[in-house]
Image (spheres, helix red, strand yellow):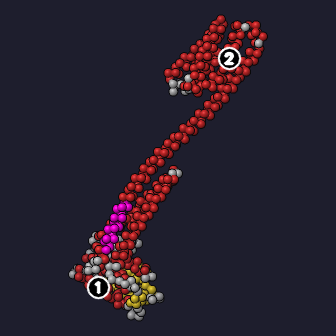
Amino acid sequence: MSPVLLIILFVFLRKRLASKTELPQLDKLFIAGLFTAIAMMVLMSAIKTSRDAVHIFCQVWLVVMFFIILSKKAFQPARPVVFAMLPIAAIEWADQLTSNFAPVFYKEWEDYFEVAGIFTLLWLIVMMILNGRQHKAFLKQREKLLQAEREAKQAEEMKMLLEKQVAERTAELVSQKQELEKALEELKATQLQLIQSEKMASLGELTAGIAHEIQNPLNFVNNFSEVNKELLAEMNDAITKGDYEEVKALAADITGNQDKINFHGKRADGIVKGMLQHSRTSSGQKELTDINVLADEYLRLAFHGLRAKDKTFNAKFETQPDTSLDKISIVPQDIGRVILNLITNAFYVVNEKKKSGAEAYEPIVLVSTKKSGDKVLITVKDNGNGIPKKILDKIFQPFFTTKPTGQGTGLGLSLSYDIVKAHGGELKVETKENEYTMFTVELPAI
C-alpha cells in the first residue's frame, strides 16, 4: 500500500502546487519520485521476497515526505493530503511492525487490522474528495477576489484619468473665464466711450464702430460657452456611469461655471443693444405722435443722408399716407429709428440693383401708412432683388447681414424687431426674389 500512497502523494503535490508551471525544478523531483514509486510497486508485485524491503523503504520515504510537507511553508497547500493519509499510513506501519515483531499478537488482531485498514482507506477517499471540492471552491473564490481586485484597479485608474481630465478642463475653463471677463470689461469700457460719442455724424458710422469693437468677442462668448456646456454635459454622463460622486459634483460645478459664462455673453449682447438704443437722445417716454409726419421726416432724412455719402446715388421715393390716422402713443425716437433703418435698407438694395446693370430699371421706394382695425400699419416697400428664401428666417438675427464687410453690422433689423415688440407690435416681411421686398410695422392704434 505504501507505493500507492506515494503515487497518490506525488500526483496530489503536482496538482495542488501547480509545479509544472509555477515550480518547474521541483516538478522534476515530483516526477522522479512518482516514477520511482511506480517502479517500487512493480518490483513488489514481481518479486515477492522484496515486499518487506519495499514496504520499509516506502514507509520511510512517506515519513520523510510528511515531515517536509508539514515543516516547509511552501508546501502548505498540500498539507490536507498528509492529514488524509496519516490514518492509513499509521495502520500500515502498525501492521508491518506487529507482523514482523509480534506475530502471535498480529494473528489474534489481524481481522481488526484489516477492518481498520478498510476504514482508513475510506477515510482517505472521503477526505480527498472533500479536499478537492474545498480546493475548487477556494480557487473559485480566489478568482472572484482577483477579478474584484482587477476591476477595482481599473476603476481607480479610470477615476484618476477622469480626475486628470476634469482638472485639465477646469484649468482651461478658468483661463477662458478670465479672458471672457476681460472681454466684458472691455465691452463696458467701449460702451462708456460710445455714450460720449454724441457728435458722431450718422447712425451708420456709429453702428459700424460698435460692430468693429464687439462683434467678434461677443460671438466668441455665446458660441464657445454653449459648446463647452454641451461637452461638459457629455462628460458628466460618462462619469455618472462610473458612479464617482465626487467627480460628478465637480462636473456639475464646471457646468455651473459655463452657465455664468453664457450669462456674461448674453449680458454683452444686451450691452450692444443698449448702446445702439441710446445712441440717439430718447427719453423712453411714449408720446402722442403723428405717424405720417414721422414717416415723411425719416424718409427724407434717409435719402439726403445717403446722397451726402454717395453723390451718384439717386432713387425715386413716394409716400402714401392715410390722412385719417389719429396720433398714436409711441416713443418717437425709437419708432423713428425703426423707420429710418427700413428705409435706409430699401435705398441700399435698389441702388445695388441699379449698379448691377439691370435693364430699364428705375429704383423706387414706397412708404405708406394705413389703419387696419385696432392696428396702424407702416409699410416700406422697394423694387430691389428681394430676399432669398434660404436666408429669410435669419434676417432678424443679431449680426446677420447680406452687405459686404464694413458696410453693415447686422444689428439694424434685430434692434428694429425688438423695438416694435416692445411697443406691443409686430415687424413682418414679405418678399419675392428679383421683384420686391416689403416690411410692415404693425403698432397698436392707441
Q: Is residue 142 left or right of residue 115?
A: left
Q: x and y percent of residue 388 in the render? A: 37, 72
Residue at horizontal 56 percent and vertical 17 percent from the top: 33
- Marker count (numbered): 2
Q: Is residue 14 left or right of residue 395?
A: right
Residue 20, placed above or below residue 109: below
Q: Quarter-wise, where is residue 426 in the image?
A: bottom left
Q: x and y percent of residue 383 in the render? A: 33, 81
Find disc 1 in the rendering and name its residue.
301
Work out how far the residue at label 1 is from the one at label 2, CA to CA, in angstroms.
125 Å
Residue at horizontal 38 percent and vertical 56 percent from the top: 172
Label 2 SS: helix
Residue at horizontal 50 percent and vertical 45 percent from the top: 155
Report the quarter where the C terminus lies.
Answer: bottom left
- Name the kind of residue labelled 1 in the image: Leu
Label 1 SS: helix
The answer, for residue 233, to whether it is visible in the render is no
Find disc 2 in the rendering and name its residue.
90
Marked residue nearer the N-terminal end (1 or 2): 2
From which residue to which does the magenta span run?
176-192
